[in-house]
Amino acid sequence: MVNSVAMRLTASPMLQWGLILGLMLAQIVAEAKESSRLSRGEAEGLFAAKIQPLLEQRCHACHGGDPDKIKGEYTMLTGRAMRRGGQTFQPALVSGKPDESPFYLAITWKSEDLQMPPKENDRMTPQQIGWIRDWIMAGAPWPKDMVAARLAAGNRWNAPGEVTVPTSGGLSDAWTQRTYEPARLWAYHPLRKPVPPGKGHPVDAFLRARFPEGVHFAPRAKPRALLRRVSFNMTGLPPRPDEMRSFLKDTIRDPDKAWAHVIDRLLDSPHHGEQMARHWLDVVRYADSAGFANDYPRPNAWRYRDYVIRSFNEDKPYHHFVREQLAGDTLKTDDPEHLIATGFLRMGPWEHTSMSVFRVTRQQWLDDVTDSVGQTFLGHALQCAKCHDHKFDPLPTRDYYRMRAAFSTTQFAGREAPFLEQENTEGFDQAERWTRAKLDQYRLQHSKLKARVDKLRKQEFSAAKVGENGLDPGDENSLARMNKNIQKHVWELDKVQPIVLSVYTGNTVTRNNIGKRLLLPKDPWAKGYLETDHILTGGNVYAPGEPVTPGALSAVSSLGGMPNPDFPEGRGNRRLALADWIVDPSNPLTARVIANRVWAWHFGRGLAGNPNNLGVTGKLPTHPALLDWLAATLVEEGWSIKRLHRIILSSEAYRSSIQHPEKVAMDQHDPERLSYAVFRPRRLVAEEFRDAMLAASGELNRQLGGVPCRPDMNPEVAMQPRQIMGGTASVYEPDPLPMQRNRRSIYAEKTRGLRDPFLEMFNQPGPDKSCELRETSTIAPQALTLMNSGEIQDRSLAFASRVLSESTSDTAAVNQVFLLALGRSATPHESRACMQHWRDAAKEEEGKQHEPHRYATRITRTVMAEKTGEPYTFVEHMPVYESYVPDLQSSEVDARTRALAQVCLVVFNSNEFAYLQ
Amino acid sequence: MMNPSHNQTVGSRRRFLFELGAGLGPLALSSMLQGDDKVPHHKSKAKSCIFLFMEGGPSHIDTFDPKPELSRRHLSEFNRSGEQESAMSSGKRYFVGSPFQFSKAGQCGADFSLPWRHLRGVADDLCFYRGCQVESVNHPTACYHVNTGNRFGGDPGLGAWVTYGLGSINANLPGFVVLPRNAYPQGGAANWSNGYLPAQFQGTPLRPEGSPILNLQAPAELGRARQRSNLDLLARLNRHHAEGHPMQDELEARMASYELAYRMQMEVPGVVDLQGESPRTLERYGVGNEPTDAFGRKCLLARRLVEKGVRFVQAYAGNWDSHDYIARAHGNLIEAVDRPIAALIGDLKERGMLEETLIVFCGEFGRTPDNGLRSGGKSYGRDHNAKAMTLWLAGGGTRAGHTLGATDALGAEAVESVHPMRDVHVTLLHLLGLDDNRLTYHHAGRFKQLSQFGGQLIQGLLA
């Protein structure tokens, strides 16, 4: 039936199939149950209502009408053809005898060698297989009038409540008329606030209502564990010792008041916005570079990052947050903040080079932004609908292109917008100084080399061959490399300019390639062309189909009972219309999506298990009523995210211990811990790991916002040649001063083509795809990183030095290590073990000479010259090392400190440091 | 850690050095070190794969696909325009003939340009394919496409899929090893990403310079004894913490990962050290001589890794992006890889390993028959071409001594046995005993697969 199957059996297909069929037959006959026979009319109805749409969706791509695509010479477009069969089987379907019909046997997937449809995604369910069986039993009748038969069948074959969904219409009638299990459409139904099913905190009441028999909430977590948990969850940082002390003291007096106070304090902390922004930036794929061949800088992306941090800190109502990111440029044109917000639309990786075709790259962005808006705000990946009506969601291709049309007048620009008072400009001098120094060096090198090459070129006689007259293509390679890096660094100078990574509305202007900031045109409609909006057949930009007008997801409107949206066309404000549709209080998805995200940020798991996918294929919510209550409350409370935090944090569920006294009952009734009767521990994420080490060592610079910082990076990676279009990218140079480097990880420059190996090692997601929740994997190279890397050595040494300077005795020092890293004192047993470890290490260190590290200001590198296929060598200057101040070095401290650093290193490696309880 | 679909698609779960996760008690540790195979979907000859990635896009026209007609039109001018042309490929263009002569080799009469002096000796072991087309003309997107099936990156690499499907035979080495050049390719490490597959399926680069694996060794000032002592203290602290903790398995796995890391420090250097090889072998691969040293090392290392049970080795060579000076550039590049690859194939054959090792030679796209004219026609090269390329396979149940597919008279476009890259992916998986439609991973509500949407087996490449 499909090529791979058919071709493997060329020798003697019928013989082999006979054998297989025989075996399968025995198996199936043994399993077959008596099924009541359908009348011809009933079977026709079943075929029209259920089977025909199924065949169309799962089989016709290879067994339909397109002669180029037919596999195994088998088409299924008519009853006759379906019976007749193809290359491998004749007949393929025997009326009344499913067990003798290869077609039927194939869809059961009973044999390893005969499985159709071949893809896991398309496999038929037992219910669907049953329908086909019954239909064949009834003689496999093929209705003359499919639509009439479908109408006649009515609801007969639908599960109770199974529904069709009104949409803007699929590419086929069968798709338009297909039905859905209502449970799977939960997220589309109007959002109503359910009444909590009990007394007390509503969150707890909803959770209790679904506890398995005999399960209760675990007791509250111990205060130390609780404060560490909530501090990391709310700010990404550990509690400070004084915060721990006062929380313990307050808890003894009045635990609820103490807890309320902590919630207030954390919600007011400026670091709260940083932690929430980290979550948000994972979803929107924040990076400071554009990715792909050139990986050009996005020098002003940081203003968007800080906008997100500010928004969470200021508790910007979520519906404003959404509108600003989608259409801020059209809302308040004179407000920098509104322009900065639209950086969201530019977050995906994108470039246009001289190799690319403009229409294609333009389409890539349109597709990217459409899908990103779907995932981010609506919990729906839309990309599937780019080529075909969605296989599972009520999402026709038409909707995809309607929504995409909301962006077809959106154009890129680096727009001017003065810096706000809240924006941190402190790092400007350093950033600009380094970039200019880098540029100066490149320009000097370039002019020398160019003079040489020009001179040789002049001498070249007309029949000269490559390499004659000393004209070395390696030199030409070097010129290209310098030019490209000069171009990048010039663009990088924009970092300190009052420019925003933004958009405007206007005509599309074809470009050859884009390697610098795009300017805002005086008249956005003067040049270029107004894009026309079509369904693109098969997603192909050169195959425009039916025209469409801007719009949104029709199933969401129809099932959610939303008013009919009115989308402008032409030069109208399409994006704003889309934004308004998204934040319309009657939009059933928006509030559920964000409420589910916030829940997941606290509990490590969404109430609906796929925060980016609330559609038919996403995990169903474990507590749908609770999710609806949270979402409805969010809207009611003016879309205040901080109110939502407050509600969640004040629940018993959040304060539960990770240990449940009734472990046996829990293992029996709730093995996956879906009930929230007990809190699930989690590992620190990459950024928290680094920030927590810096916090413990006392090196963390807690300054907010500003141009990206450059922490120290594993030098082997930092200096490794990295290919970009036209040559080798500049090496990575860290910032010169410890306080500039040791800032929170969210401020670390994020270059798509150069991931920080430390953060990447601990599952920091790549910025190319939206990440709904972090993964946690445990692999041996993580242990290598935490034992051997420069980061861990530096932090451990600084930590030891800090502790010694703050302690009056050795035991107090060891205890301080535990207090600062783990939020508790060392037990006597631990204290003894660590003291012994320290003494042993000190003995080894005694008398050892540690040499200070020397930093070269230039590096010689050998790479392959593209033009010659030979290695060539060049020198690159690294201006930062003219003024680089390393973190505390082992040569600067005594043996005792170095030895204590070994204790610190072990504590940083401990499971207790890595996991929150 | 594994998602539920994992069990549906592979026979037995196996664990190896890099694969540590939840559910790993002390008893599981010993079985983890022994390692066990997963069951493939069907019988196949190939047990492992060496993928020679020719980064930059080698020109089929100047290597394995001679175009005499092009030589006749050398430097003849034509104009091209249209909305499907990029800035690079439109405007005034000139056909350029290959600077190289061609000759046939082997019983099968395969075509080689003259700079191939050694590979032609194993011509009858190769299966050339001239029908492949890709979807992108930019390096990183094309590299992502060939490596991961998705132009935009972020998906698992071929090696990750193969390791996920077949497991590793060796407990002490990762199943998917990458041998990059000292300069990483455009698009970086995303070319060997685990994507949405669990992290242990990520390609592990063995770096040609410096530490083969990052942070493999502790700083020189710290002795091994100190490190052992640190690990012992760590174990004590962790034992105390684990008492009554609900995540015993995960915590134990993390502790086990430290012991394994400690052992890796001793074992990995031995694997990458080529000292044990005979001078004859080193000479054969071109190790120690220029310009073959760098790729010779990679080919020899690839053989050693496969011998030790690594499933998938990807070795990078390049940069083949010869927009200019193609005579000199391609001439040098061929020389740099010719002897090492011939040695690899010969060596595997002599050891009886070629039949169970699939070798792939492939770039991210082919090159154009035409060029914008540079320096009066003296420094011509070729631009990117997604519509035509030559790749070849060897060993592992491929159809040796055969050429499948053809390009048009100018080498501009594949016209016979044309298939998209996803069909090549399906075929490579098939050769390794895996069915693309069943090698799936459930992620974000969908069963995902290497070919993205399914593909077709290219029967003509199979023995």
Image (spheres, coloured by chain):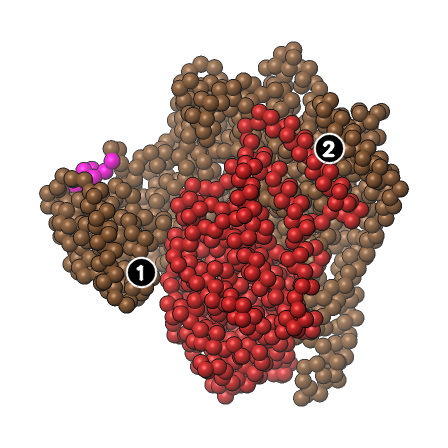
Q: Position of residue A59 (x, y in %)?
A: 28, 54
Crowd rating for badge 2 (residues with CA inside 10 Å; few <14, some 14–19, many 20+): many
Chain A colour? brown
Give yes or no for contact between labels 1 and 2 (Cβ–Cβ under 8 Å).
Answer: no
Task: Please determine whether, in this image, residue A452 is positioned above or below residue A19.
Answer: below
Stretch of the chain drawn in magenta? A153-159
Label ID, residue A430: none
Q: Position of residue B36 (x, y in %)?
A: 49, 49
Residue at screen point 39% across, 54% down: B41
Label ID, residue A696: 2
Asked if residue A154 lies in the magenta stretch, the reply is: yes
Location of the N terminus of chain A (image quadrant) = bottom left
The nearer-to-camera label among 1 and 2 is: 1
Sequence order check: which comes first, mark 1 or mark 2?
A: 1
Viewer-proximal residue among A211 and A381 = A211
Q: Secondary structure at mark 2?
A: helix
Q: Quadrant of residue B296?
A: bottom right
Mark 1 — residue?
A: A5
Residue at screen point 69% across, 15% down: A249
Residue that sits furthest to the right in the current view = A847
Chain B colour? red
Q: Amino acid at mark 1?
A: Val
Can residue A300 be seen from the camera position used here?
A: no
Task: Please determine whether, in this image, residue A907 is positioned above or below residue B274.
Answer: above
Task: Please determine whether, in this image, residue B428 is positioned above or below residue A760.
Answer: below
Q: Chain of mark 1?
A: A
